[in-house]
Image: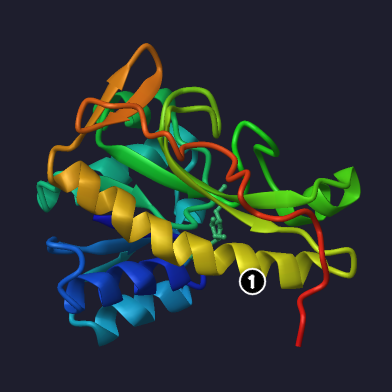
């Protein structure tokens, strides 16, 4: 089950990984909170049931989330994947899917939770930025991190160029993390995610990436 709000490029990466046999999974449905979201069209093109539940039709966040939960549970998914789903979720929703609710965030958490991560990364002068896949908990963008990917930040980057570089990594790590989850390879101990019972040495900032240099060629 994948939840989206807009473009759906991460959804597309997941669809492509499934179709290529790299991700043994079945996407039972896609739900979007914006009826015109291009991501819903991507799902339909791929032959996946796609539903729009417009949050503007509900008086409260809780009512919207209840409707969302009813639609999700109809499909009995093993995992609920937030892929650019730009809604804060209620506590009841998060509790209902605890331990099987994944999100991708465009920063190396815990750096830059919230919105406008690429512009904020540039403003802060970091030389390394990236993306994180994490379990969703009550703390916004604060749940245990499953996998991260780092990219260099170059002096002449704009938020758009940096976003594009990060997005390529998002498309790589989200199918990977979903596959680990579905294979039962992930566990959480003391707030840390273990893969096959071990902490992953490469988790966190990739120190192998050289300091900020303009790309050659
Ligand atoms: C992605 O960059 C994702 O990391 C981000 O929204 C974008 C959605 O793109 N998510 C968040 O900011 C969540 N707080 P997409 O619709 O093309 O996958």
Residue situated in front as seen by the camera: 203 or 137: 203
Note whether ligand 1 is within 8 Å of mark 1: no
Q: Quadrant of the N terminus?
A: bottom left
Q: Quadrant of the C terminus?
A: bottom right
Snapshot quadrant of residue 31? bottom left
What residue lies at 79% left-to-right and 49% top-to-bottom?
Answer: 121
Left or right of 73 in this view: 106 = right
From what the image shows, is residue 18 above or below residue 184? below
Left or right of 7 in this view: 186 = left
Residue situated in front as seen by the camera: 133 or 32: 133
From what the image shows, is residue 201 above or below residue 48? above
Whole-percent x, y for residue 145 in the image? 44, 34
Image quarter for ligand 1:
bottom right
From what the image shows, is residue 19 above or below residue 103? below
Whole-percent x, y for residue 14 in the image? 31, 67
Coloration mode: rainbow
What residue lies at 49% left-to-right and 41% top-to-bottom?
Answer: 59
What residue lies at 54% left-to-right and 51% top-to-bottom?
Answer: 86
Q: Which residue is mark 1?
A: 164
């Amino acid at each position: 089950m994948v939840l989206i709000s807009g473009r759906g490029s991460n959804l597309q990466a997941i669809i492509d990984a499934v179709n290529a046999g790299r991700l043994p999974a079945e996407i039972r449905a896609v739900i979007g909170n914006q009826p015109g979201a291009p991501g819903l069209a991507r799902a339909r093109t791929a032959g996946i049931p796609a539903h729009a539940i417009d949050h503007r039709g509900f008086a409260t966040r809780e009512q919207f989330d209840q409707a969302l939960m009813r639609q999700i549970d109809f499909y009995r998914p093993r995992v609920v994947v937030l892929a650019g789903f730009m809604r804060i979720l209620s506590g009841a929703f998060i509790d209902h899917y605890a331990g099987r609710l994944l999100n991708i965030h465009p920063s190396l958490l815990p750096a830059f939770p919230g919105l406008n991560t690429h512009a904020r990364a540039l403003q802060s002068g970091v030389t390394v930025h990236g993306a994180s896949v994490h379990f969703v908990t009550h703390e916004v963008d604060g749940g245990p991190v499953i996998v991260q990917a780092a990219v260099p930040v170059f002096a002449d980057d704009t938020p758009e160029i940096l976003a594009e570089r990060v997005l390529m990594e998002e498309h790589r790590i989200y199918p990977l993390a979903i596959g680990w989850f579905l294979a039962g390879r992930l566990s959480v101990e003391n707030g840390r995610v273990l893969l096959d019972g071990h902490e992953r040495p490469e988790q966190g900032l990739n120190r192998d990436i050289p300091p900020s240099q303009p790309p050659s060629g």
